[in-house]
Image (tube, grey):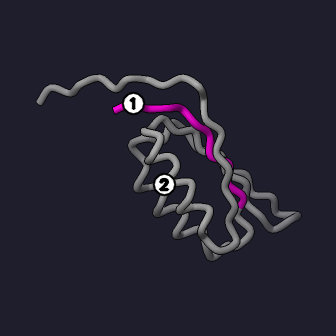
Amino acid sequence: MDTRVAVISIIVENPEAIVTLNDLLHEAGNYIIGRMGIPYREKGINIISIAIDAPQDMISSLSGKIGRLKGVSAKTAYSNIITKAEAQND
């Protein structure tokens, strides 16, 4: 399975969406390289960046699910490097 590195930028304007957002990110936890969250209290929003190394369809699916949450917007930037995943020996 080929993987790509991407960054998902998320802006949360609806605090009620945070629990669902965290559930989605937890499900993708095996692929997440790192996460940075910045509460912007003056504006009442949260800004989150997710660095991820995963198959293209998984990244697209995650970003789409996040973007469909009410009061949440998401944009994804992809690297041009595609990595061939190593075969796993059981």
Q: What secondary structure do most residues of the magenta stretch adopt?
A: strand
The residue nearer to you, when weighing 83 against 22, is 83
Q: Residue at x 52, y 39 (%)?
A: 52
> What element does badge 1 sit on?
strand
Q: Which residues are magenta?
A: 1-11
2 or 1: tag closer to the N-terminus: 1
> What element does badge 2 sit on?
helix
Q: Separation of disc 2 and disc 1 at Cα?
A: 16 Å
Q: Which residue is mark 1?
A: 2
The residue nearer to you, when weighing 73 against 37, is 73
Q: Amino acid at mark 2?
A: Ser
For residue 87, side relative to residue 13 (left or right): left
Q: Residue at x 46, y 63 (%)?
A: 23
Residue 3 forms part of the magenta stretch: yes
The residue nearer to you, when weighing 58 against 11, is 58
Where 58 sits versus 71, above or below?
above
Where 74 sits versus 43, above or below?
above
Q: Quadrant of the C terminus?
A: top left
Q: Which mark is residue 61?
A: 2
Q: Residue at x 73, y 51 (%)?
A: 38
On the image, which quarter does residue 77 sit in? top right
Q: Amino acid at mark 1?
A: Asp
Q: Residues within 10 Å of mark 1 (few under 14, many from 20)?
A: few
